[in-house]
Image (tube, grey):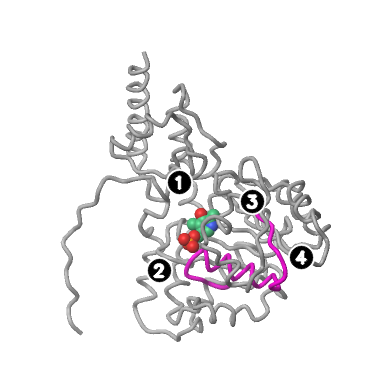
Amino acid sequence: MSQPQQFAPQQFAPQQFASDNYAGICPEAWAAMEAANAGSAPAYGNDDWTQRAADAFRALFASDCEVFFAFNGTAANSLALAALCQSYHSVICSSSAHVETDECGAPEFFSNGSKLLVATTADGKLTPEAIRGVATSRSDIHFPKPRVVTITQPTETGQVYSIDEIRAIAATCRALGLKLHMDGARFAHACAHLGCDPADITWRAGVDVLCFGGTKNGMAVGEAILFFDRALAQDFDYRCKQAGQLASKMRFLAAPWVGMLESGAWLRNAEHANGCASQLAAAIRDLPEVAPMFPVEANALFLQAPAALLEDLRERGWSFYTFIGGGARFMFAWDSDPARVDELAADIRAAREASAAIAA
Ligand SMILES: *Cc1c(COP(=O)(O)O)cnc(C)c1O
């Protein structure tokens, strides 16, 4: 075998907090990838790593759930929703849900047309009232029949549904004959915030299917789809294969999960990321004209501030998105450097002082 090329150490630009998927791969996931790479193994998920990862999920959730692996969250959400629906069904979601705003119609595509019904919510969280309103707005043959509710935990706005909120939503779903799906692209961050058992905000609270995100939690790629009601997973393996989501070298999607779950890194990474969001929120709490748009409960901080101040912040070298309500979104990851968070806080303070001086 030939010697691999040696790469010179790379110079990285200073860390940014524009998205939590700017981060690299955490050591625990990387170590498991390396271990899985030490030899060959059977393909298409018939290997020990895939079995071990699925078992680690079953242990973590204290549930005999069915576990599948997909390459990304769009595929995981879309295929899970498609599995719950016929093409004439509909899916109730929040107006800011990733499935509605950021998946390019994939849920509708993979379900052969199941329509997303958007419930307008003040802050991104669905409520039993909002669900009931949409689900009971029509009952005639001309309207796509409501079949599933999907909630994002934590929400796209960085808020966490409490155990009681999920129970209440699940009770509403049961009363209306709807299934409950959870987009858990940052599920670990919700568990870290609540300090709860993962089962308490999923199957014990009435969630039927969970998409558990690995990418934003410190893996290179990969999301797990957990069916707590095994009957709902019927033929899901075929659905994954048809959608191009059956990895032939499945062990490289599965092994990082073994590293994350068996070491506890999944939770530590999320605690660290959440801590950085709280750190930034605390550091700028006293600033006038600069305020969090939503309660800071997970790894996100959305900052409402005058446009000139945000422009100044960009000129000071910071990248961020403003696609939700015009505020600046900062997202933290397992590798976020607290010293760099302090630098951001100092620059927000400096930008605020500069804009105050101009106004005076
Ligand atoms: C990132 C994210 C996903 C998954 O996105 P992909 O880019 O498809 O991996 C799903 N839901 C939410 C809420 C997300 O933030």
> Alpha carbon of mark 3 to alpha carbon of mark 2: how far?
36 Å
The residue carrying mark 1 is: 273
Magenta stretch contains residue 153: no
Q: Earlier in the sequence, mark 4 or mark 3?
A: 3
> Alpha carbon of mark 4 to alpha carbon of mark 1: how far?
39 Å
Asked whether mark 1 lies closer than 8 Å to ligand 1, one says: no
Residue ranking furthest to the front: 142
Q: Earlier in the sequence, mark 1 or mark 2?
A: 2
Amino acid type indicated by mark 3 = Ser
Residue ranking furthest to the top: 360
Closer to the observer: label 2 or label 4?
4
Asked whether mark 2 lies closer than 8 Å to ligand 1, one says: no
81, above or below 15, in the image? below
The residue carrying mark 4 is: 145
Closer to the observer: label 3 or label 2?
3
- Point out the image quarter for the C terminus: top left
> Alpha carbon of mark 1 to alpha carbon of mark 3: how far?
25 Å
110, above or below 148, in the image? below
Amino acid type indicated by mark 2 = Ala
Left-right relation of 355 to 159: left
